[in-house]
Image (cartoon, helix red, strand yellow):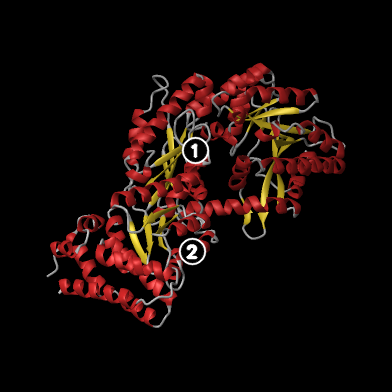
Amino acid sequence: MLTVDDLKNFGADTDTGLARCMGNEGLYLRLVRSLCDDPSFDKLTEAVEAGALKEGFEAAHSLKGVLGNLSLTPIYDKVVEITEHLRNETEMDYKPLIGDLNSLRNDLKKLCG
Amino acid sequence: MENFRKSSGLKRRVLVVDDEEINCEILGNILRGRYEVDYAHDGREAFGMLKNASPQYSLILLDLLMPKMDGFELIKVCRGSSGLKNIPIIVMTSEKEAEVKSINLGAVDFITKPYDMPEVILARCERIIELSEDKTIISSAEKDNLTGMYSRDFFFEYIRQLEVYNRDRLMDALIFNIDHFHLINEMYGRKMGNMILKELAQMLMNIFKDVAGIGCRTEADTFYVYCQHQFSYDSIMKMIQDNLPDLSETAKIRVRMGIYPNVDKDVEVEQWFDRAKLACDRIRGDYTKAMSTYSSELHERSLYHEKLINEIGEAINRKDLIVYYQPKYGIQGDKPVLKSAEALIRWKHPENGMISPGDFVPLFEGNGLIQKLDNYVWEEAARQIRKWKEKYGRTIPVSVNVSRIDIYDPELESKLLKILENNDLTSEELLLEITESAYADNAKALADVVESLRNKGFMIEMDDFGSGYSSLNMLTTIAVDAIKIDMKFIRNMRRDDKSLRMVKLIVDIAKFLDVPTVAEGVEDEVQVEVLKKMGCDLIQGFYFSRPVPPEEFEKLIEKDMAG
């Protein structure tokens, strides 16, 4: 069962995230849980693997917005980094970055149970 | 009354457009306490919702990067659509560059991502909605200086604005009017008049603020109120009537009220108040009623009136308007003698049949068309006098009506003289009837016109004498050539002693002034005998003849000539 403390330990800025939800813990935790299944993660991974940087950027950008609003800082920071590269369509090996991102996502998934 | 938006508890609608469900939920959670919130997940869906919205949205919170139609595109299509271009749009973005671009396209503000704290978002939304709503109504002058109520233009604009978000509420349109306000001004002074207006305004504002009402003053003593639908206005009316100041120990101010309940939101705002006015006007002069409610029957009647107004020009051209003549007989000799006639209009409508003058004359008096009608009757009557003169070698003078509005016509005299000239008649042959009650507020103007007409040789008959409140006063300022006793007194003469004495009094006054009296509405021999004994000179009424078309009138002439 996911708790606010779990998220805090994970590195999330839960004070800010909760404040955005007007202190509604239930809502905050529910939104974090639903994030784990956000299709944008897979879209981003697939697009980058296929070299479709524009589509990759769109997915990353979407994720960035949501992660920022939930103040899930570690994943947010990672996505910001990826988004910036994709925005500039930097030709580079995205695998390590995407790998880091998915491992963070898995950590979160585990927390969510 | 001033802050309807806040006091009414009306919730504005906000549309959140974002393809990320989580963002929608966070915003929804923030906004729901204060607004009705709907969601769209791309620009195209949003556009569809905006187009079909009722009531319309007060604000759009817009994400930029979305599938199908992105935020920039939605701003463009909204700004290009007349119905949507005034809805403020706040853009939600994390990109500085996008902020500039969206403001340039017409967004009014932005919210950064990740979102600001809820209070910041709420304050922004509130401010933008307020600014946008005020902007539309700020252009018109807001207040009436005297009463502090809204001005008419502002009031209508305000209602239109409210209605965008208020369509589903049942509302009433009301009109309040003070009886004979111009006389209060004249008799007690403008200062007193203004004081009464202020008091009534204050009272209306106090009473109607409890039912989310707003009000304005339009013409001098007319007030409009727009408020939530009330089942009954009895107690409100009583409160107003009880609290108005008295003019004197005997004179009370009377307020009339016209109600158009559950306004039809599919018609224009102005029309709501036209309908309330229609109801209010119906009880003008009826002292038994202070309130009147608009009904479909009243609506039918006003449509019928509208039809008559539209058709009067054509009716004149087609000669559907026919002048009838009712004879006036001199009764002081051994036997009655045909002396003159009165011209009376009839409308033979191709679809509606004979329309009684009672149905259209007051209507045309109200809107000024009576002048057209009067001019027509003058011409027809003059032609008829001429015709009879040629046929019978004698003049049957015909009296025609001169309405209030004719008196103000600078060309009145020249029109009449031209008509006489065209028919080769003199000014004694066309008699002019004026009604004293129609000029109570401007006796001076009437006196000047009458004097000038008499100098040209016209004979002036004063119609309906005794019914107005200033009949006697009138005679001291205006010289007339005959007095027609109000029909009411003649009718009541037999069963009501006061009426009888009134008739006697009028006849005596006329004798004193050395002018003849005419009794109208005489129906039987007993009345004729009584009037004859009193010294009344002329009689008009069913006893001799109803008003008849010219051909029939000729039989009366022939009979008179045969002796």
Instruction: Give B433 or B407, whichever is nearer the viewer.
Output: B407
Residue at far left of view: A1
Query: Quadrant of the rendered structure where residue B398 is?
Result: top right
Residue B335 in view? no
Q: Which residue is mark 2?
A: B72
User: Which is in the foreground here, disc 1 or disc 2?
Assistant: 2
At label 2, the amino acid type is Phe
In the depicted structure, whether residue A35 falls above or below residue B526: below
Residue at 64% x, 17% y: name it: B476
Instruction: Give A38 or B452, whichever is nearer the viewer.
Output: A38
At label 1, the amino acid type is Arg
- The mark nearer the N terminus, 1 or 2, is 2
Residue at 49% x, 24% y: name it: B184
Instruction: Give B168 or B325, whichever is nearer the viewer.
Output: B168
Residue at far bottom of view: A50
**x and y, in percent, of residue B225 in the image:** 42, 41
User: Mark 1, residues whose alpha carbon is within 10 Å: few (<14), some, or many (≥20)?
Assistant: some
Residue at 48% x, 63% y: name it: B72
Q: Is residue B240 left or right of residue B500?
A: left
**x and y, in percent, of residue B343 in the image:** 71, 41
Q: Is residue B519 left or right of residue B18?
A: right
**Circle 1 chain:** B
Q: Which residue is mark 1?
A: B284
**x and y, in percent, of residue B302 in the image:** 54, 51
Instruction: Give B401 or B59, whichever is nearer the viewer.
Output: B59
Q: Secondary structure at mark 1?
A: loop
Instruction: Let me know if marks 1 and 2 both belong to one chain.
Output: yes
Residue B534 in view? yes
In the depicted structure, whether residue B346 falls above or below residue B236: below
